[in-house]
Amino acid sequence: MSKIVVTRSMLFQSSLRKELARSFGATLVILFTIVLTMVLIRTLGAASRGSVNPEEIMLVLGYTVLGYTQTILALALFIAVVSVLSRMYRDSEMIIWFASGRSITAFLAPVLRFAWPILAVIGLMVFLVWPWANQQTANLRERFESRSDLQRIAPGQFQESSSGRRVFFIDKDTSDGIEGRNVFISSIEDDGRETVTTASAGRVETINDRPYLVLEQGQRMERDAQTGQLKISDFMSYGVLIGDSAQQLMEGQSLKARSTWSLIDSWDAASQGELAWRVGVVFSAINLIILGLAATVSNPRAGKSGNLLFTLFAFTVYFNLLNITQRSIATGQTPLLPTLVALHGGVLVLCLLWLAKRHQALSLRDLFIPKRLPQP
C-alpha cells in the first residue's frame, strides 16, 4: 500500500513539473520575442534621434533586454502556473487528483520545487546583472553623447548638438573627424542671446578636461532677443565649449546602474528606494506563484482567456504597487522595512488565506456567518 502511495506521489509531482516546464519554456520564448521587438523599435527610434550610436544598436538592445530578464522570468513563471492549473481544471484532471486525496495545498510543494531555480536566477539577475546591464547601457550612451559636436555631423548636413541649443553645418571635414572646413554655428545662449558664427576652419581641443571647438578666421554675430540689438565681430581664433567633462558625466550616473553593495553603503533615501525595488522583485515572484495557486479556478463562462486576463491584471497591479512604494521610499515618505513588510507581507498573508479558504472549501458566507447546528 505504501508503494502505491509513493508511486502516486511521484507521478503527481513529475507530471506537474513536466507541465510547468513546457508551459514556462513556451511562455518565456513568447515574452522574450515581444520584449525584444518593443525594445528594438525603441532603440531604433533613439538612434534616429541621435541618442544612440547606430553602430552600437545591437549592444544597446542586448543590454536592455538583459535588464528586463528578471521581470520576464517572474511573469513567465506566473503565467505558467496559471495556465497549467487552468488546463488541468478544464480537462478534469484536478477532479481526479482531488478524488485521489490531493488538495489544492498539495500543489504548493511541487510548484515551489520547480520554481526555486528560476527564483534564484531572478535574484541573481536583479541584484547583479540588472545594475551591470544598466551601467553598460549608460556607458554606451555617455560615450556617444560625449563625442564632440563636430563628430556628430556629416558634411553638407545641418545637425543639432547634444544639448539641442546649437545647429552645426560644415562644408567638409578631415578623415579623423577632428577638424572641419567652412563651419557654421547657430546657437541660443543661456541669457537668451542668439548667435551666428561662421569660420573658415575649426578643430577640437581638450582644455582643462573639457572639449572645446576652436574656430579660426571667422565672424560672429550676436542678437539680443529683448532689444533686437545686433553686434558683429571678427576674430582670428575663437573657442566654443561643446561638451561636459568626464567627471560631470560620471556624476550623472543613474541609481539603476549602481551596484547593490553601493546602495547599501550609501543608504540614503534614493538608494533605499532602488534597493526596495530590487528586493521587491524577488518577493513579488514568490507571492505571484502562491497567488496563481489560490486564484486559478475553473470558470467555463470566462473561457480559456479568463484566467490569463486575471494573470496580466494581477501582475500589472502588483508591479505598479512596487513602483509606487519605490518612489515613496526614495522621497522619504515611508521607511524601508515597514513598507516592504506591509506590501509583500500583506500580499503573502492574503494569498495564504485565500489558499487556505480553498483548501477548506469555505465561502465568504461561511467565514462571516457561522453554520447553525440542526435542531434535534
Image (tube, helix red, strand yellow):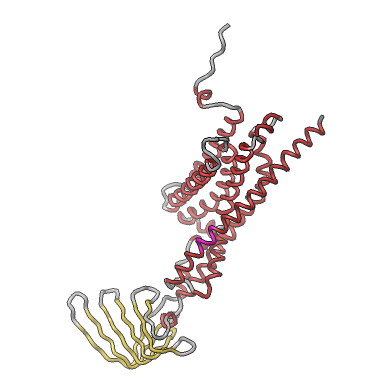
Q: What is the x, y in percent for residue 214?
A: 38, 87
Start-end of magenta stretch? 34-39
What's the residue at 41%, 48% (across, down)? Answer: 333
Above or below, 319 against 253 in this view is above
The answer to whether residue 64 is above or below residue 195 is above
Q: How many marks?
A: 0
* Residue 155 x, y percent position in the rendering: 41, 86
Please check the rendered image and state whether residue 291 is part of the magenta-colored stretch, yes or no. Answer: no
Location of residue 81 in the rendering, given as x and y in whole percent from the top left corner: 61, 44
Q: Residue at x 25, y 85 (%)?
A: 221
Quadrant that contains the N terminus: top right
Image quarter where the C terminus lies is top right
Nearest the eye: 306 or 136: 306
Above or below — where is 358 with respect to 172?
A: above
Q: Is residue 173 visible?
A: yes
Q: Residue at x 55, y 37 (%)?
A: 295
Q: Is residue 345 visible?
A: no
Determine the main secondary structure of the stretch shown in magenta: helix
Nearest the camera: 219 or 53?
Answer: 53
Is residue 36 inside the magenta stretch? yes
In this image, 237 relative to 326: left or right?
left
Residue 297 on image: x %, y %: 57, 35
* Residue 375 shown left or right of residue 182 in the figure: right
Front-most of residues 282 and 39? 39
In which quarter of the view is residue 216 placed? bottom left
Eyeballing the image, is 168 above or below 115?
A: below
